[in-house]
């Protein structure tokens, strides 16, 4: 196995995804769930605990559970999608991807396990050309959020939510490119929870899915946020289609609210990175409508943050 990391200059190319949202069926998601559950990568069924069993403040009378993906293998939900991607591709193949961090970490972990040669391309500024990447050393490109197998793998999180709370009223999920939000939303809705309201949360400075909902097509923008994992330069095509079908609304939080969320969670004993704290920030700042008296699930999507980084957050 060999995994290397390179940086590339800016390029104005987006990724075309020919798969339709209609290809996502309950059977497909259930198959992926089993693949993830039995993956040799050791994906964890992460705890989902009642908010009332923590020291987190709550001003709204409702029944909130928090799903602790910050405790997941490799530190974030990304390993779920990676487990399904690698399981459905030839062992020992050569792959290349682009990632701001968490996907790259899970990609490298899987590459080591499967004996694959992998390269993680981390853009210096903005977009990366898929065609350029694929030409590197005859490698196969794996997308970090706009990929059918990846989204289906992320759906396993949605099924785990339903094991604890079979009929949630509201589910709140962070949104970057949209892969996690799309997978969780599809799993919950296709499993029969038609009345569940699912909300995506984006930073104000990286609101590609929010703008895509307004313009009714996937859009790109210059993104900037402390939550770098939620700041890809464009919304995924397949995630956008699935979110249009299954997501109630995209809501926004600002960087100061995200910083405060990281600090609040840390004081309660929960180590959560800025990207992983966005859904909590939306609840804490009353961005989600009509949750009083409701059964609510909030996803804490990742915990990859170091001690040196924590010094930049308020006490």
Image: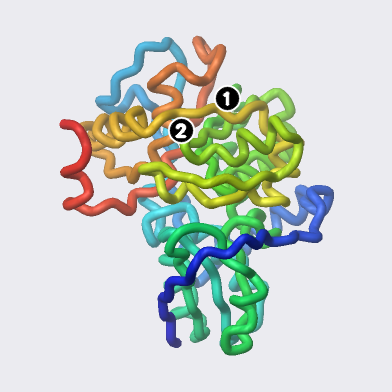
Q: Secondary structure at mark 1?
A: strand
Query: In the rendered view of the protein, which quadrant contains the C terminus?
Result: top left
Q: Secondary structure at mark 2?
A: helix
| Rendering coords of residue 123 (x, y %) | 47, 64
Q: Which residue is mark 2?
A: 279
How many angstroms separate mark 2 from mark 1 (CA)? 12 Å
Q: Is residue 287 toward the left or the right of residue 54 in the image?
A: right
Closest to the observer, 312 or 215: 215
Label 2: how many residues lie within 10 Å, few (<14), some (14-19) or many (20+)?
many
Q: Which residue is mark 1?
A: 170
Residue sitting at x 45%, y 28%: 253
| Rendering coords of residue 258 (x, y %) | 36, 33
Closest to the observer, 230 or 189: 230
Dividing the picture into quadrants, the one containing residue 97 is bottom right
| Rendering coords of residue 150 (x, y %) | 62, 59
Dividing the picture into quadrants, the one containing residue 262 is top left
Residue 96, numbered label: none
């Amino acid at each position: 196995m060999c995994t290397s990391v390179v940086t590339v200059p800016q390029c104005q190319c987006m990724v075309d995804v020919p798969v339709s949202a209609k290809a996502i069926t309950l059977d497909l998601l259930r198959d992926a769930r089993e693949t993830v559950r039995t993956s040799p990568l050791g994906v964890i069924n992460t705890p989902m605990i009642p908010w009332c069993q923590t020291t987190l403040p709550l001003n709204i009378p409702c029944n909130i559970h928090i799903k602790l993906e910050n405790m997941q293998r490799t530190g974030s939900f990304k390993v779920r999608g990676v487990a399904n991607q690698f399981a459905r591709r030839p062992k020992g193949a050569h792959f290349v991807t682009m990632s701001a961090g968490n996907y790259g970490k899970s990609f490298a972990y899987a590459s080591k396990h499967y004996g694959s040669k992998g390269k993680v391309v981390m853009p210096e500024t903005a977009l990366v050309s898929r065609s350029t990447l694929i030409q590197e050393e005859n490698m196969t490109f794996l997308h970090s959020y706009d990929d059918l197998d990846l989204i289906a793998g992320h759906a396993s999180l949605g099924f785990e939510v339903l094991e604890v709370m079979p009929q949630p009223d509201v589910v709140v999920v962070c949104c970057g490119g949209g892969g996690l939000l799309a997978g969780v939303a599809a799993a919950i809705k296709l499993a029969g929870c038609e009345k569940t309201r699912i909300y995506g949360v984006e930073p104000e400075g990286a609101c590609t899915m929010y703008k895509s909902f307004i313009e009714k097509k996937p859009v790109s923008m210059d993104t900037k946020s402390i939550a770098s994992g939620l700041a890809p330069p464009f919304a995924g095509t397949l995630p956008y289609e699935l979110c249009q079908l299954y997501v109630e609304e995209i809501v926004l939080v600002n960087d100061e609210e995200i910083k405060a969320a990281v600090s609040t969670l840390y004081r309660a004993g929960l180590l959560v990175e800025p990207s992983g704290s966005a859904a909590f920030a939306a609840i804490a700042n009353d961005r989600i409508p009509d949750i009083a008296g409701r059964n609510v699930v909030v996803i804490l999507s990742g915990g990859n943050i170091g001690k040196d980084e924590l010094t930049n957050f308020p006490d």
